[in-house]
Image (cartoon, rainbow, N blue to C red):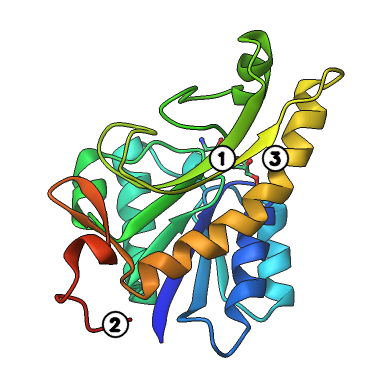
């Protein structure tokens, strides 16, 4: 079973969904550690309650972005992960960092990418008059929120939605999507090949994992 590390910055509800899913013995990975760039992230306490090693690498404690990232890298490599999941991790990662884990680092984003990369996705979907909203799990590449898509889920936008209501409903879809998408990557059903997400059926015959 593969080793999964999770990077967070706050609440960590997606991290919790991953931890819960991975507790099923038939799940093809286990969460071996959680890292946060914020020492006050609620998700750190949650991870500890599950007996998962959880550490803060406080970005404010480092003189530069580079120095912080080097410390994150060191803490991460100690966990020796096969796959890294960004779950509400709100720091940009350098191209070198991203390249080091190419095809092995995934992220969840609260929109139907390529629509609405960046922040305030719920308000922007409402302002655009979208009738559908959703979330995306994608491989992390050097261009933020632009990596190859592994899986998506959509929800209906309701007439009286506010950004908060929409975010809350979408979060429940995120909690179902992320464990599903991680499973696809862990068992080799989806891989990143030449900058694209390729499903096992597209590489039939070359996949021993299914
Ligand atoms: C989630 O909605 C996630 O999709 C979003 O932050 C939230 C984290 O919540 N991520 C991004 O906006 C990434 N740019 P959580 O800490 O409870 O999982």
Residue 167 place in picture, x, y as percent: 73, 34
**In the displayed structure image, the side of residue 202 where residue 92 appears, left or right:** right
Q: Which residue in the structure is indicated by mark 1?
A: 135
Q: Quadrant of the N terminus?
A: bottom left
The residue shown at (58%, 55%) is 177
Dividing the picture into quadrants, the one containing residue 104 is: bottom left
- Distance from the alpha carbon under mark 3 to that under mark 1: 7 Å
The residue shown at (60%, 77%) is 52
On the question of residue 91 being in view, the answer is yes
Q: Tell me, yes or no, whether the two marked residues, 2 and 3, touch with CB atoms within 8 Å.
A: no
- Distance from the alpha carbon under mark 2 to that under mark 1: 27 Å
**In the displayed structure image, the side of residue 120 where residue 170 appears, left or right:** right
Residue 111 place in picture, x, y as percent: 55, 32
Chain-order first, disc 3 or disc 1: 1
Q: Which residue in the structure is indicated by mark 3?
A: 170
> How many other residues sit within 10 Å of disc 3, few (<14), some (14-19) or many (≥20)?
many
Q: Which element type, helix, strand or loop, lies under badge 3?
A: helix
Q: Which residue in the structure is indicated by mark 2?
A: 209
27 over 17 or under it: above or below: below
- Distance from the alpha carbon under mark 2 to that under mark 3: 31 Å
Q: Tell me, yes or no, whether the two marked residues, 3 and 1, touch with CB atoms within 8 Å.
A: yes
Dividing the picture into quadrants, the one containing residue 79 is: bottom left
Chain-order first, disc 2 or disc 1: 1
On the question of residue 109 being in view, the answer is no
Chain-order first, disc 2 or disc 3: 3
93 over 187 or under it: above or below: above
**In the displayed structure image, the side of residue 157 where residue 174 appears, left or right:** left
């Amino acid at each position: 079973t593969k080793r999964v590390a999770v990077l967070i910055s706050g609440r960590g509800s997606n991290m919790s969904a991953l931890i819960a899913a991975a507790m099923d013995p038939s799940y093809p990975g286990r969460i071996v550690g959680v890292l946060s760039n914020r020492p006050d992230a609620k998700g750190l306490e949650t991870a500890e309650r599950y007996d998962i090693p959880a550490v803060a690498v406080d970005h404010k404690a480092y003189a530069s972005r580079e120095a912080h990232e080097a410390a994150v890298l060191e803490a991460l490599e100690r966990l020796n992960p096969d796959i890294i999941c960004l779950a509400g991790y709100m720091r940009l990662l350098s191209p070198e960092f991203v390249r080091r884990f190419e095809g092995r680092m995934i992220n969840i984003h609260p929109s139907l990418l390529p629509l609405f990369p960046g922040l305030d996705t719920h308000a922007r979907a409402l302002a655009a008059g979208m009738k559908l909203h959703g979330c995306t799990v994608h491989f992390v590449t050097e261009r933020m929120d632009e990596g190859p898509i592994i899986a998506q889920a959509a929800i209906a936008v309701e007439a009286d939605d506010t950004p908060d209501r929409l975010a809350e409903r979408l979060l429940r879809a995120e909690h179902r999507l992320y464990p599903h998408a991680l499973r696809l990557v862990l068992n080799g059903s989806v891989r990143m090949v030449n900058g694209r997400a390729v499903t096992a059926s597209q590489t039939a015959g070359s996949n021993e994992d299914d």
